[in-house]
Each structure stands twice: as structure tokens, then as C-alpha cells.
Amino acid sequence: MELRHLRYFMAVAETGSLTVAAERRLHTSQPSLSRQIRDLEDEVGVALFVRSARGVELTPAGKAFLDHARLALTQVDAAIEAARRAAQPTKQVFALGFLTGQEMTWLPRAMQVLRDELPNIDVTVSSHYSPDLADALARGKLDLAFLRAEPGFDLDYRVVSREKLIVLMPSDHSLTERMAIRPEDFVGETFIMASNKAKVLHEVIEQYLQRSGVNVTPEHGVDNLAMAMSLVASTRGLALMPEYANNLLPWSVVSRPLEGETPTIDLVIGYSRSNTSPVLKLFLSRADELVVHPPT
């Protein structure tokens, strides 16, 4: 079994189509990809996919194989990244990642923690959705990230802030007259929900609505804050988002706090315990400095 077999398997599993995987992900022919998948199934000894009119779906054996294949590829990517970094010892690179929008608050604090090492290292900064940051940490593409505590990754997390959720609404919505929004105010309104990709936020919102005894059917799902603000403005809907959204609101969207006990969502720093970077070790030793004055 070769790595390419695992990469081909992952591409088909994630797209649900031999044709799409071949043309858009792997840039090979569909017959060639089909042969590679058959070779993999022959070596494993069981069928990994079942073909149907809708495309291809994982068999129970394929689903069991999927998690292990993803972990194997993640570990290979991490090994490659570690080797590349070790081959350039003249100046260390420390790769920081931020949940998009959070870098405005947390990048200055992170740089302050690293201030003594800055002459000796190159710091790279990127911003992405939280699941993408977790994946980059697991693959060794990032050393440390400010994100949500994403499940399903072999990472360590430390909480640096607990953000309140706020209500986003159009700037001319009737509810803007209220100082705070009650859970029952969502009833009858277009509700914009965090999608399953934003799993941590989705669960926090879902639990809050259940505790409040409010039955709301989301009409839209969003992966990120920019999409949420766009839909709030275009559909005249309401959305529950973390408080840092206040830093990014356009003129067409405003926020209001929630009345009563307000749900919170953790912002964490995440890292891989297998990362041996001395800069990471230093950063973690001073990580408590990040939460001396948490955002309000």
C-alpha cells in the first residue's frame, strides 16, 4: 500500500464522486482512479465503497478505514514539515494561526510574549476558520493557534478567554430599540445558525436555546462570521455570534447583548504535544500572560 492510495481514497471519500475526485482534486483520469481504488480494496481485502446512482458511498469497512487513513496522512504531513524546518536551522520559524477576526486582539499579546525571542525567529501569521486551524496544527503547518477547542484532533488546548454571545441584527430592525434581547424574541424571526462546520459554536447555541425552552428552526447555516453578517443584512435575520464580532460589524449590522444568563464560548490556544519547537515551549511557559487582562 502506498501513500497515493490513501490520498486517492480520501479524495473519493470527501467528494463522494470518482469523477469529481479525479478531475478536481487529483487531476487524473476517472478510469485510472477507479483502478487505484480497486487495488486498495484488493489489498485491504474488503469493499471500501459502494457504487450508487448518486455516486459512491463508504461501506461500514470504509468508514472504519477513513479515520485511520486520515491520521496516517496527517502524521506523514507533520513529519515532512518537521524535516523541512530542521533543514533550515539558521533562523527558526514560529507559525501562529488565528481564528479570523481574533488576530486584532490577540496578535499583539502573542508578540509581547515572544518579544525576547523576536530577533532570533521569523514569525508567520495566518487566519482561518477554527477547524482548518486545528487541522494545520495536527499536520505541523502551525506551531500554535488561537481557535476553538475542536474535537477529533490530537491536540492540547488551554483556555485564554471566555467570550459572551451577542445577537446580531439589521441596523434598522425593530429589536434595536431593546437594551437586551430575550430568548423568546427569537421566535418568529429568521434565525441564522452556526453550521456543523462551526461545531463548537453550534453546540453552544443549541444548548442555550434548549436551556431557555425556546424552539427555533434555523433558516440558514453559516460557517463563519463574515457569512453570518452578510445573511443578517440580506435576510433581515438574527444570529448569535461571539462578542468579538463587534470588532468587525459593517454599518448595516448592529449587536445587542442577551438578557439574563449569557452563554459563553471558549477561545483557546491549541498546539500539538508532539511539536518539539523550543519557541513553542517558551511560549507555553509564559502563556498565563495572555489572560491577565482578558477581553471584556
Image: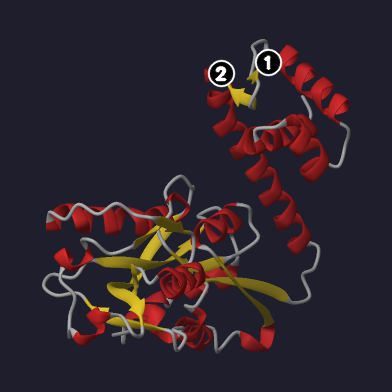
Residue occupied by mark 1? 44
* Residue 157: mark: none
Determine the residue positioned at 82% across, 40% down.
23
Question: Which residue is painted at 47% across and 78% down in the image?
Answer: 102
**In front: 117, or 38?**
38
Say few, some or many: other residues with alpha carbon within 10 Å of mark 2 (under 14 / 14 to 19 / 20 or more): few
x, y percentage for residue 207? 23, 53
Residue drawn 86% across and 42% down?
A: 27
Which image quadrant: the N terminus? top right
The answer to whether mark 1 and mark 2 are in CB contact below 8 A is: yes
Q: Where is residue 172 drawn, in percent x and y? A: 33, 85
- Where 263 sits versus 17, above or below? below
Please tell me which residue lies in front, 24 or 184.
184
Q: Tell me: 162 left or right of 111.
A: left
The residue type indicated by label 2 comes to Ala
Rendered image quadrant of residue 95 = bottom right
User: Alpha carbon of mark 1 to alpha carbon of mark 2: how far?
Assistant: 10 Å
- What numbered label is drawn on residue 61? 2
Is residue 243 in view? Answer: no
Q: Is residue 101 left or right of residue 292?
A: right
Q: Is residue 198 above or below residue 172?
A: above
Q: Amino acid at mark 1?
A: Val
Q: Quadrant of residue 46?
A: top right
Relative vertical location of residue 216 with respect to residue 143 in this rendering, above or below: above
Of circles 1 and 2, the one toward us is: 2
Looking at the picture, the colour scheme in use is: secondary structure
Disc 2 element: helix
